[in-house]
Image (cartoon, rainbow, N blue to C red):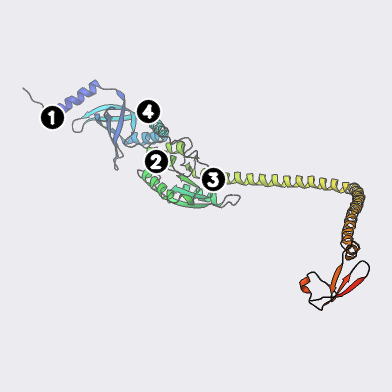
Amino acid sequence: MNPLSLYDLNALVRRSIEQCLPDEYWVQAELSEVRVHPATGHCYLEFVQKDPRGNNLVAKARGVIWNNIFHLLRPYFEESTGQAFTAGIKVLVQVTVSFHELYGYSLTVQDIDPAYTLGDIARRRREILQQLEEDGVLTLNKELPMPVLPQRIAVISSATAAGYGDFRHQLEHNPRGYYFRVELFPAAMQGERVEDSILEALDRIHERQEEFDAVVIIRGGGATSDLSCFDTYLLAAACAQFPLPIITGIGHERDDTVLDAVAHQRVKTPTAAAEYLISRMDETASHLSELVERLHEGVTLRLRQEHIRLQQYRSRIPTTSVRRLATARMELLTAHKDLHRAVESMLTRYRHRLELLRQRITDASPEKQLARGYSITLKDGRAVKNAAELHPGDRIETRLKEGKIISTVNP
């Protein structure tokens, strides 16, 4: 029995691997660790594969991308995918298999296929959008009405971002001098803090939502690889359900994030976000100008119509006046005749009534009564109506139709 040293055994393993696996192989895996050595520039990786049913690890391998390859692959990958070359992404890499007596088994990356990662990113975006749709919130922010005059703007951006300065400059120097009130709610727009800081900013705006007309989320410049931080379910759900319209301008025209998909309005850049707000003001100003013009035309037309009517009335006044005077004259004559007849009729009725009253008065006169055989007894010139009024010795006068009788009352 001739035992081998550990080095001899590892050397045997290395020669066997080099003989059995001499080619380059395309491998699908997830990056669980990405570490760049600051001195050498080499990138050290850990590849893993998970069980899709239980999410447990089923395979793991160390990997390396040498500096001369890494400084080419990384910008190519990030520019192509809009995704940072970082842990947590799935990649399709071309590798050679190696074994080192001291460091053991590893995979050396020679190339990478961004299309595979793009497909995985697109799949994750689709899954998030599908979940938002199933939750019934996907289009809620798009359905909000944009204010007619969006002048009170809450901005979520980095305070030092050039894009924020461009946004403010564009608003403050708009050609027509529209007034905008802009308040910044600072947030990280790249790195691991993006989701948490934007959510915190949204919470602060929500507490004062009555003070704003719209929310603008902008990012000035920045690497395309930083866009992945805008592809999270929590951030998208918060924006989709936010009670104010959200405008996104995070700096890349060809790359749509999940946040762009749920926002009320998606524009390319911070400057474009400002131009959109100015255009909304322009639309309102144009509409107001159109209304003013229509009002002016309407008033002018109405005045012209009324002037024509006035002229028509004016030309009709003489004829109408003569006709109305003639009609009034005829009505006056008719009324005069009617009044004359009415007065005569009334006078006749009252004359007849007076005649009847005169006859009744005549019939009731003392002379008439005396003529009928009645007499009147007077005492001191006053008619005696009751015998109890007389006393013995009173001198009374009895008047008849013809003459009078003087008497003295006896006891």
Q: Report the residue marked by disc 3.
A: 147
Amino acid at dot 2: Leu
State the CA–CA distance, disc 3 to disc 1: 75 Å
Q: Are marks 3 and 2 in contact (CB under 8 Å)?
A: no
State the CA–CA distance, disc 3 to disc 2: 24 Å
Query: Which of label 4 and label 1 is nearer to you?
Result: 4
Residue located at (54% from left, 45% from top): 147
Going from N to C along the chain, the mark reached first, 4 or 1, is 1
State the CA–CA distance, disc 4 to disc 1: 40 Å
Q: Position of residue 268 (x, y in %)?
A: 50, 40
Q: Single out the residue that lies furthest toward the top.
A: 20
Is the residue marked by circle 4 packed among few (<14), some (14-19), or many (20+) residues within 10 Å? some
State the CA–CA distance, disc 2 to disc 1: 53 Å
Going from N to C along the chain, the mark reached first, 4 or 3, is 4
Asked whether residue 27 appears in the rendered view, the answer is yes
* Quadrant assignment, res 3: top left
Going from N to C along the chain, the mark reached first, 3 or 1, is 1
Q: Report the residue marked by disc 4.
A: 116
Going from N to C along the chain, the mark reached first, 3 or 2, is 3
Amino acid at dot 3: Pro
Q: Position of residue 182 (x, y in %)?
A: 49, 52
Between 291 and 60, the one lying in front of the other is 291
Is 377 positioned to the left or the right of 181 in the image? right
Q: Report the residue marked by disc 2.
A: 235
Between 122 and 136, the one lying in front of the other is 136
Query: Which of label 3 and label 1 is nearer to you?
Result: 3
Amino acid at dot 1: Leu
Q: Quadrant of the N terminus?
A: top left
